[in-house]
Amino acid sequence: MSSTDRREFLHSAAGLAAAAAIVPSAAELEAVWRPRRAIDVAVIGGGRQGRDILAELAKIEGVNVAAVCELDKRRLRRALRRTTGAKGYSEWNKMLAAHAGVTAVFVATPTHLHKDVVIGLLRAGKHVYCEAPMASTIDDAKAIAKAGLSAKTTFQVGHYARANPVYKLARSFYRSGSIETLISARCQWHRKTTWRLATSDASREKVLNWRLYQATSSGLPGEFGSHWFDAIRWFTRKTPVSVRGVGSTMLHNDGREIPDTVLCQFDFGEGVSMLFDATLANSFGSRHALLNGTMGTIKLAGRHGWLFKEADAPVQGWEVYANRQQFHDESGITLIADATQLAAQGRLKDGVGLPHPELHYSLERFLQSATEGKPVCCTALDGLYAAAVSIKAHEAVLANAEIKIDPSLFKV
Amino acid sequence: MGTRFELVLGGDDKTQLRAAGEEALEEIALWDRHLSRFRRDSQVSHANRHAAAGWVSLAPEVFRLLERCRDLWEATDGRFDPALGAVMQRLGFHGDREPGSENDSNPVPLAHRFDRVALDADRHAIRFATAGLSLDLGAVGKGWALDRAAQILDDHDVGCALIHGGTSTVIARGAPPDAEGWIVGVADPLVPERPLARCVLGDGEALSVSAPHGRSVDVGGHILDPRTGASAGDVALAAVVDTEAVRADAWSTALVVSASPAAVGCFIVHGDGRRESSAHQFRSHDSE
């Protein structure tokens, strides 16, 4: 074998090792799935998340958004601009009565309003996608989970990690022992924003800014942290036994009841802990999670993921040709979905990141479950776990205390 | 869009103003995610990867921008052409120049123009009639995003605002206290540190400034004449005032390509220093 041949062989082998049985092909990642027959769907909630859902659904040919429901007229107007001819409603049950033929409904209302909507839709026989977190109280979360488990239709909770091809790849590395023994996890969500919506109508202030008030919000652990709590459990199969929380208002002292900066420490037992750090007063590092093991670290950040290896970790042949990125003194192997094909074509760098936003894969997967019977990637019980952990973390933050997390919380 | 956006808001309720401003900036960030050629997950990148092989469905709002681009492409007689992405890349405007492109006598193949882009309004879908073509909405992306952001400020009854993207596209609402309008300086394109003119922007007006300088590629400037493939002519700066930032952006690009009559108010500086103005908003700095 000539040196060139050997290099080519190793190059291809690199892809084989890196992508072993992990994710769809590059072509599948790039292409937009479409249903076998055209379907009508509806979206409830016209805030930012609802509008993002509409933008991604528009890319899927054969999925027609027939109706959008939103209480606020201005937001409804903006949401409808993101559709082609959908009808607007202010009440979801009236929308459902007028569009009884919709196959699936995407619920992106404020979290504390999920319960009645989701249960009503499931009872009406609709496939339901519920944005995360699933609920802001334990009672609501359990009620939704119970309805989701007993439904004959598809019920998926919108924790993106489970449909994200890069995370799936990272999880396969984790499960195959790439970082060996987990010692700790750290996750953060940093944004510099008031998290407030403007309104000149004082009577609407608490309705629109439900995330800022204790009666309606599970705070930063709920709205941001729940996604990481789900992802870490999905990777590690570990659940916390307690959480200690602290929080304070560092920047936005505007009458809100929810701290704008929180730190939570979860104890998983056996010496393993997880830190969750979230703030609305600083944007450095944005959102990412680290899984630290005795032989390496996996970093997850939306459409990107990296594997950092300890100096004494065994080196695999394919690593010589892997795409790398430097972070100060650390060199991370870029986790690339379907590295096999790309490496063979000499286009490994083209695979960095994802060709669609994370949300797209979650919506696509839900529609595949609803129309083709594919297993649900984030179930009612998964949603219950993430909601329950985030609610307890929020309680710990508000109490500035340590709170036990009883495993019975995760059961219906 | 690879540039900095800033806004100034006037009013009494700081909490509400900040929330409205954040929503406007979020809208701009959303359009960056949709339109960036440098993000693999943008709608423009999605179209560029697949539209030569078949129809590609896009978000309706993105499709409406493409329809608007087609109207502006027609109105400017092809001087503004958003289908030149591949040509710009080949010439090095988006990174490394492709080998051999230095000797191109006509760097814009006939097949790489907007008339090779088909739009299907019923399916909000796009298709390229030619392989190798790609969209580059850089000339109008800032203007479109600013128009949408200003609409959000209008929805929140913010009556006094100025937003700019990269200082080259500006949109105004109301006026500062005791002022006739928002005063925006226009630098001399030949001596950038020297103020050349000022533009007084009134309520609902937008300003866009284009110049062939600003990027270092050896084709004489970064604005091409899509009709001939040559780089822009002798115009050193074109500034346009209009009621829509997206239209101002398209026309300022078109006027740098060729300073022939425009359907908008404009201020043009030629390479030899000659100036011409057809809009009352522009006032010579010398005359102040």
Image: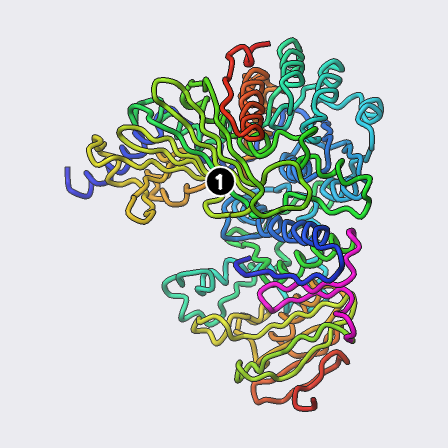
Q: Is residue B161 one of those drawn in magenta?
A: yes
In the picture, measured across the screen, residue A198 lies left or right of residue B98, that is right
User: Based on the displayed image, in which of its 4 quarters is residue B141 positioned?
Assistant: bottom right
Q: Is residue B143 one of those drawn in magenta?
A: no
SS for dot 1 = strand
In the picture, measured across the screen, residue B180 lies left or right of residue A20, that is right
Q: Could you say which is closer to the camera, residue A343 or residue A379? A: A379
Q: Is residue A290 above or below residue A387?
A: below
Q: Residue at x 64, y 25 (%)?
A: A136
Q: Position of residue A394 (x, y in %)?
A: 57, 28
Q: Residue at x 67, y 63 (%)?
A: B8
In the picture, measured across the screen, residue A23 lies left or right of residue A193, that is left
Q: Residue at x 54, y 26 (%)?
A: A396
Type of the residue with mark 1? Arg
Q: Is residue B197 above or below residue A320?
A: below
Q: Could you say which is closer to the camera, residue B79 or residue B181? A: B181
Identify the coloring.
rainbow
- Tell me which chain the residue with mark 1 is part of: A
Q: Is residue A409 above or below residue B197?
A: above
Check disc 1 and report the residue beneath it: A287
Query: Can the viewer see residue B73 in this picture?
Result: no
Q: Is residue A191 above or below residue B187?
A: above
Query: Can the viewer see residue A355 in this picture?
Result: yes
Q: Residue furthest front?
A: A400
- Stretch in magenta: B155-179
